[in-house]
């Protein structure tokens, strides 16, 4: 069983920055592709960024150039650095991973508002 715990969500003004963390339990974290998703009120959950076990990354068009996904396998932790935040980035952010993406964290709230 793998568990993910997200942290770092907060209220921030437009143009600001936040860094989200996702800490995983278990020793098998390093072999899986990991991802960040988000879900805004009244909207479907959407993929934000993905990182493979080898470190290759891909991003949703809406966050390219502003967000950076990374991982530290020695710490069983994945990160999402979010810069130039916009009001439309407001959502609950979830980390996801494991075989077939079966594991989810509980989510962390990011609110971008003036």
Image (cartoon, helix red, strand yellow):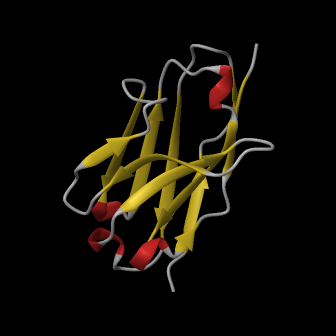
Q: Indicate whether 109 appears above or below 86.
A: below
Residue 10 shown left or right of residue 105 in the figure: right
Image quadrant assignment for residue 42: top right
Residue at position x 49%, y 51% in the image: 36
Q: Indicate whether 97 appears above or below 87.
A: below
The spot of residue 70 in percent (x, y) is 33, 46
Residue at position x 53%, y 73% in the image: 103
Figure disc tally: 0
Residue at position x 58%, y 62% in the image: 5
The extreme right residue here reads: 42
Q: Please name whichever residue, 97 or 100, is drawn nearer the observer in this view of the structure.
A: 100
The extreme bottom residue here reads: 1
Residue at position x 57%, y 13% in the image: 15
The spot of residue 112 in percent (x, y) is 69, 24
The spot of residue 54 in percent (x, y) is 19, 59
The spot of residue 19 in percent (x, y) is 50, 36
Quadrant where the C terminus sits is top right
Q: Indicate whether 89 appears above or below 52.
A: above
Q: Please name whichever residue, 5 or 56, is drawn nearer the observer in this view of the structure.
A: 56
Residue 32 shown left or right of residue 11 in the figure: left
Q: Please name whichever residue, 30 or 48, is drawn nearer the observer in this view of the structure.
A: 48
């Amino acid at each position: 069983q793998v568990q993910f715990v997200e942290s770092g969500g907060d209220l921030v003004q437009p143009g600001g920055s936040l860094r989200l963390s996702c800490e995983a339990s278990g020793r098998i974290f390093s072999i899986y592709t990991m991802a960040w998703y988000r879900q805004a009120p009244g909207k479907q959950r959407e993929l934000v960024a993905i990182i493979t076990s080898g470190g290759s990354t891909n991003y949703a068009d809406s966050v390219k150039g502003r967000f950076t996904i990374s991982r530290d396998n020695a710490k069983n932790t994945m990160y999402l650095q979010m810069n130039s935040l916009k009001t439309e980035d407001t959502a609950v952010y979830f980390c996801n991973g494991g075989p077939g993406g079966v594991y989810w964290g509980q989510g962390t709230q990011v609110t971008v508002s003036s």
